[in-house]
Image (cartoon, coloured by chain):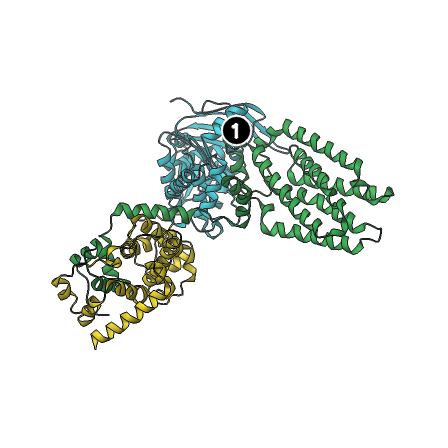
Amino acid sequence: MGTDPDLDVDPVPDRRSDAVLVADAADGDRGALRVLYERHAPWLVLRLGRRCADPGLVEEVVQDTFVGVWRGARRFRGEGEVAAWIWGIGIRRLLDRLRSRPAPLPTAWSGDEVFVSAEDEVLLGIEHGDLGTALHQLSPELRAVLQATVLDGLTTKEAARLLGIPQGTVKTRMQRARRQMREALA
Amino acid sequence: MTTWHADDTTLARYAGGTIDDAAAASIEAHLIACEPCRMAVSAQVVPARLDRMWAGVLDEVDAPTPGPIERGLAAVGVRPHVARLLAATPSLRLSWLAAQAVALGTAVVAAEATAGRGADVGLFLFLVVAALLPVLGVAVAYGPGSDPAYEVGVAAPMRGIRLVTIRATAVLAASAVLAGVAAVAAPSLGWIAAAWLLPSLGLTTATLALSTAVRPIMAAGAVTGAWLIVTSVTAVRAADRLAAFRGTAQVLFVVLTFVSLWVLTRRRHTFERGVMP
Amino acid sequence: MSVPTVQVIGVEKRFLRTTALQGVTFDAAAGITGLLGPNGAGKTTLLRMLATVLAPDTGELRLLGWDPGNAEERLAIRRRLGYMPQEPGFHRNFTTFEFVDYVAILKEMVERRARHDEVRRVLSLVGLEDVAGRKIKNLSGGMRRRVALAQALLGDPDLLVLDEPTAGLDPAQRLRFREIVSERAEARTVILSTHQTEDVAALCPRVVVMDEGRALFDGTPAELAGIASGRVWLAAERAADAHLSWRAGDGRHRHIGTAPSGADLVEPTVEDGYLLLVGRRALEAEEAA
């Protein structure tokens, strides 16, 4: 339960669930939006930063996202994680921005190899194991396409815009990526 | 979901961009579902950066989203803060404008229906109504009866005459546009359909001038009454029903406008003090 | 007394059928001055004059050193003034932010970014920043009063005129209101009206008691209580010839008037002094409140 706005009460950490916060924000509760921001803005900044190397653009997109959360709060039906819904808004805002202003991709997505430590492999052993290894065997371009469509939930068209490549290329790379993954995991 | 959580080192490397794609993908998928890890990773973002973005969010969230009227006004070149003042005017709201449109629409239909029969009844009706609508709009554009924040407005530095003028001009313009559209929609009326313009200007300025002495609603009532009497009398007594709109009469309305504006200017200080309802 | 920022000299005001003010004279300086009086005492009329909304029929006013009767000086006063009317009205569909933003425009804050920052500042002063986006018609009565107070605080005015700011609020809300107002009163002049003596006792170092268009008393709350010194007593039975009496909390009767010898005298409160001055009408109004 929220605090009674008519009484002067010391701030208590807000215990409302994300879904309740969204519902309250839909009712015009700015405090609810603030809590959602505190909970979700940080990871959103980091995640978007790994898809777009322009930090200023990332900040604008995060701002736009939470304005979008505020204005679209009524449309959230309570299905699934609020974080996933926020990501959906955020990545699409990024795509909208990229439409008018193409931005640099982060190095990990543009083809330069990133050093993989043995440590990472051990840490991820529980989660990925073969999957992680298989993923590493893909070229960066194929990996990027896979992550855009599978992890970020983008359509072919949206992935094309994010990566700055034609839609047809996205499709062929997806097919190749899937084939290679299947072969690696077989 | 497993009980796997990312530790701080991993999260730091994720934030720093020194982690490989597979691990990053794993973390990102995990963060969607794990609140404690989201909290943990929030320490990886500079607070100043978060505050700056929040200030930007607030600015957009608080800024009242301009309604269609305000956007229309902005398109015409009205400055945003003036448009905000107008947004608080009851007679510029969609419901009011819709009512005016209906009144004009009815008049146009009547005019069309009786056109060409020499009786000119419909045209007469249209002209009378079109000239009167801004008067009614101005009556509720300001003043203690219709402005809920009237007292606060009087006590504010903005000069009363300025607020009144801004609103009255907007009401007049809005009514003129509506009536203009209606006139164009009834081509059988001919050029005389514009004959309401000067009368409406005269009547509206007369209402404003009168409201330096009495309350706006009373001023509007007096002007409306006088107008209806004058038009009815001339329609009955003169051979030409539209006598009130012909050449000489138009000149009289120009004179009325100037006289009203002169009175308004001389007595503008009356808007500086409050009129108690 | 320090330099007066508000001077009211022999002010009179007559309406169609009533005389609202009959020659009121007093001064106010920085700090909080309370206007205490029953309904119809003329408090609202006087406050409207202090807010430059009404002009007196006769008499003089000097606000912050300027004369509100002069157009240019009146403008100067209004630029340093904040006014909270008795019946604050709001436009039907406005949100909290939109309404305060609208008043800010009336207060000549033309530049959007600075104006919005100022609106947010006053909203957080009164603790309403979380409902900035909510429509005013959906706010509780106490919160609406705070919106009205917020718009009065725009521009950090030197003169704050508040008409019955605590009317209709419950004790917790009233306490909060007093805190906000007393914080603001540091170097500014606050004039507020009320018909609740406890507001005055808790908040106002100076009190002016008004009734029927006249100022009956001008001094500190302690002095007001002192008027009733030796004239307040308790008794088991009601005494018929007392000026005023009512049933106290413990079942005994509290009397104000000329005490009979041997009566059980008690320390007078601010309320006692007020009632002694103003009489039966005020008592009935207090009981009804």
Q: Is residue A86 left or right of residue B44?
A: right
Q: Reply above or below: B191 against B105.
A: above
In this rendered view, identify the residue nearer to me: C240 or A109. A109
The x, y position of residue A176, in whole percent, is: 28, 70
- Residue farthest to the bottom? A186
The chain carrying label 1 is C
Q: Quadrant where the C terminus of chain B lies?
A: top right
Q: Is residue B86 left or right of residue A1?
A: right
**Picture quadrant of residue C212:** top right
Q: Residue at 76% x, 54% y: name it.
A: B112
The x, y position of residue A13, in whole percent, is: 28, 54
Q: Reply above or below: B130 against B157.
A: below
Q: Colour of chain B?
A: green
Q: Amino acid at mark 1?
A: Arg
Q: Is residue B82 left or right of residue C203?
A: right
In this rendered view, identify the residue nearer to me: A50 or C245. A50
The x, y position of residue C287, in whole percent, is: 47, 44
The x, y position of residue C284, in whole percent, is: 50, 42
Counting every numbered tag in the picture gives: 1
Q: Quadrant where the N terminus of chain B lies?
A: bottom left
The residue under label 1 is C214
In this rendered view, identify the residue nearer to me: C90 or B244. B244
Q: Is residue C32 visible?
A: yes
Q: Colour of chain C?
A: cyan
Chain (yellow):
A
In this rendered view, identify the residue nearer to me: C189 or A108. A108
- Residue farthest to the left? A118
